[in-house]
Image: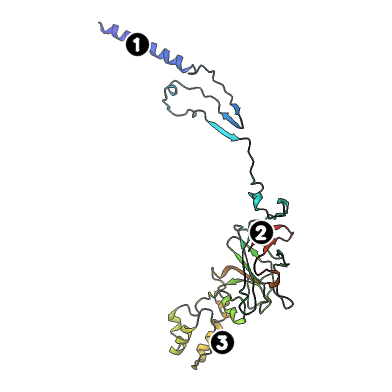
Amino acid sequence: MPKGVIITVVIVFMILVIGVLVILATTSSDGEVPSDNATTTVEGDVSTETEPVQRRGLFEFFGWNLGGSNPPAREVETSSSGSSSNTGNGIRDEDIPHGYTRADLSQYFGKITVDDVRRPNLNSAPPFIYTIVIAGHTGETRVPVTNWKLQTNHGSVFIPKGDITLSPDTNVSGEAISLRDGEVLFLHTNTPPHAINFRLNKCTGYLNEEGFLPKLPQECPEVFKTRSELSLFSAECQDYVLSLGRCEGPLSRIPEFNDGHCFATLLTRAEYRGCFNAHRNDSDFARNEWHAWLGTNAREFSDIFDSRHDRVLLLDDRGKIVDEFFY
């Protein structure tokens, strides 16, 4: 067959193939007419939204996506029925204290919590001290809790003010105790040796010498930062310093040796004032604990807590419920 005839046949065949492809590409495979508008169908309680049907190009018809085309239509199901007990800040109906409604809840409900009521051993010697543990879950936001009320089946008491700095060189001013995430307030029902409530710092362990009950955590820093510094004192002084416990000052155990320089140095370092002045600017000086005492010279409040079982409500300064605790 002549070469010219072969070329002519090939060209005619290609034209026919292209024509068929064009017809197929412009016709919906299901015989549907493409629309530019989305449609919504409802089946029972579930609505189905369908994206607009996209016109397919010649290559996309055979699955050859060369870029720039829209993805195929998808269906999105949305529930149009059903109910939940989680309404209003994620608080479940079953979490609302018995006898109260959602309207009785504080904006801080679940954000400040009563985590424990530590009860005394009534078979031991007095004083019988109850300690209520209140914790913050508020992120970085500080929430003042002073003047909030603890209410039990036997009475109620208000949270007092406290001192955040507890400087030995200034009078205790008294300010609102506030909590944020990770901070804890320990409320003790007895009377303190001094009428102060405070946030702990790394030196407050020395205040146990004043007779605080329950005893404060003893986490005081070392009196001498290095052994090299301590080595400047006599051997007897070094032995004595190394024998002292954490947060133990020299007045608790008067040394038997005669070293005035050693003793004078300890008097200015191994006690609250010296420790405070040396470490007040440390980045880790303040602790995440507050301690406050509910008792006064006129009354201690152990009697408002039942020794066996009780219900404790924490109410904010508007009388709204913040938390409920049972024991």
- Residue depicted at x 72% and y 78%: 297
Q: Earlier in the sequence, mark 1 or mark 2?
A: 1
Residue 82 falls in image quadrant: top right
**Residue 86 as seen in the image, left or right of residue 223:** right
Q: Which structural element holds mark 2?
A: strand
Name the quadrant of the N terminus. top left
- Residue depicted at x 54% and y 75%: 218
Q: Nearer the viewer, residue 251 or 113?
A: 113
Mark 2 = which residue?
A: 323
**Residue 115 as seen in the image, left or right of residue 59:** right
Mark 3 Cα-neighbour bin, 10 Å: few <14, some 14–19, many ≥20: few
- x and y percentages locating residue 231 in the rendered image: 43, 84
Q: Which structural element holds mark 1?
A: helix
In the rendered structure, find residue 251 and report the number of the disc placed on it. Answer: 3
Mark 1 = which residue?
A: 11
Q: In the picture shown, does residue 318 fall above or below 122?
A: above
Mark 2 Cα-neighbour bin, 10 Å: few <14, some 14–19, many ≥20: many
Q: Earlier in the sequence, mark 2 or mark 3?
A: 3
Q: Amino acid at mark 2?
A: Asp
Q: Specify the farthest residue to the left.
A: 1
- Asked whether the beta carbons under mark 1 and mark 2 sit within 8 Å of each other, the answer is no
**Residue 172 as seen in the image, left or right of residue 139:** right
- x and y percentages locating residue 21 in the rendered image: 42, 16
Q: In the picture shown, does residue 27 fall above or below 144?
A: above
